[in-house]
Amino acid sequence: MKLTHWIGVALIAAAATALGARLQQGQDAMTPLAERYIKLVLALGQHDPDYVDAYYGPEALKTEAAAAKRSLADLDVDAHSVREALRNTRLPEGADEMTRLRREYLIRQVESLGARVAMLSGTRLDFDEESKALYDAVAPVHGEEEFTQVLTALDRRLPGPGTLQQRYETFRSTFVIPPARLDTVFKAAIEACRQRTLEHVELPKDERFTVEYVTGKSWSGYNWYQGNYRSLIQVNTDLPIFIDRAIDLACHEGYPGHHVYNVLLEQHLVHDRGWQEFAVYPLFSPQSLIAEGTANYGIEVAFPREDRLDFERRVLFPAAGLDPSRVTEYYEVQALVDQLSYAGNEAARRYLNGEIDAAGAAAWLEKYALYGPPRAAQRVKFIDQYRSYVINYNLGKDMVARHVEIDSGDPTDAVARWAAFTRLLSSPRLPSGLRRSSADAQDALRR
């Protein structure tokens, strides 16, 4: 072999080594800032009990945060310092997309933390200002006339005496899962969601979660991620649980929703890349729009409509003791009700902006979202506790759907859609990044 070939090989190897060293320097520059971010999140959790949704990093950092009890003013100064340091961190030429996303993610998460500090310190933001500051997104405004059109269609679909809300409650009451059958139905739904997910997503062999049934909560279900690929999923049984919630909760909280999202972040970012900042999850942050949006969209990824109707008819309705012949009827009505999803955002927007009070918010939910009085009261409690977080479910789903369907190249190709969905679950992409990437992809398609 010619000497020039060996010289060329040596030069290529040296260049690769130099590039690797520059990339490592860029990574190392962010590592201490990432640790400061973790400490900030844990410290803010001392002021806001809902703020730290999950943490499975070094226990010493959690102990330190509890002992230090840093003031909000101190956290504000430190957050500003970390944000500026991240902005001034220059990644080396050739940094991969994931590294660039990591830096953008950290900057925006720290900015969101600063906004939460300001809110806890007394700063008042309106609904849209708050959602932009915390979640990197603003939900569109929907007027009463849009919901009225849907309600008119439902009025024709559910004729009879009483108000539409009463007729809907009467109709839906025949699709409640009996309490004695609840666990059996949920286990069947979970197993089906898991099987469908594992056909497309490679998960660690030791991943798993447990399910508990609880009461006295403002939410219907919750995933508490505990690290080591484990979750605790709690289902609130305060109100009747309808048959559609079996697959919805099994997918949303479990497969391919929150449990899978957290497992993939732990596996690919925390363990494989050593990015310890992903071992902490601040609830009031842009990460939540991605988490809730993928969890809701994941229901459709795992169970496209016809597949879902078939499974419900064969498995879940019989397991719940319900009439399988009514599956299509039930989901035709639910498809219309789903078009009222953004009515919940409007109730929260008006309530948090001071345009209506709690009673007015409940009345709005009853009229435009068809909530029964107990459920409307529960939802107002949720808004009191989590405020503009409500946008993450419907707006998050819509943004995730657009991104995944464009990224897949062919929304009708189930394999491609699962692949695009899994890429999103495994990456530190921001809500504003979803919009940018979707717009870029659309421009490319037009060209």
Image (cartoon, grey):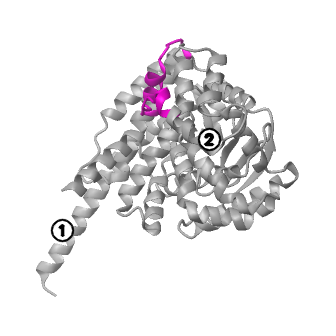
Image point (23%, 64%), residue name: 14
* Separation of residues labelled 2 and 1 (CA atoms): 44 Å
Q: Percent from the top left, x then y, of residue 329? A: 66, 55
Q: Quadrant of residue 305?
A: bottom right
Q: Is residue 123 or residue 97 the one in the foreground? A: 123
Screen quadrant of the C terminus: bottom left
How many numbered badges does the structure rendering display?
Answer: 2
Amino acid type at image mark 2: Tyr
Q: Nearer the viewer, mark 2 or mark 1?
A: 2
Q: From what the image shows, is residue 374 above or below residue 221?
A: above
- Neighbourhood count class around disc 2 (C-alpha, 10 Å): few under 14, some 14–19, many 20 upward: many
Q: Which residues are magenta?
A: 120-147
Q: Percent from the top left, x then y, of residue 261? A: 55, 52
Q: Is residue 19 or residue 130 the one in the foreground? A: 130
* Left or right placement of residue 41 versus residue 178 in this view: left
Image point (18%, 68%), residue name: 11
Amino acid type at image mark 1: Leu
Residues at badges 2 and 1 in contact (C-beta under 8 Å)? Answer: no
Which numbered circle lies on residue 55? 2
Viewer can see residue 389: no
- Which residue is at the far bottom? 1
Which numbered circle lies on residue 11? 1
Q: Percent from the top left, x then y, of residue 272? A: 49, 58
Image point (69%, 42%), residue name: 221
- Neighbourhood count class around disc 1 (C-alpha, 10 Å): few under 14, some 14–19, many 20 upward: few
- Say what secondary structure mark 1 lies in: helix
Viewer can see residue 362: yes
Q: From what the image shows, is residue 86 above or below residue 201?
A: above
- Say what secondary structure mark 2 lies in: strand
Q: From what the image shows, is residue 369 above or below residue 23?
A: above
- Which residue is at the far right? 180
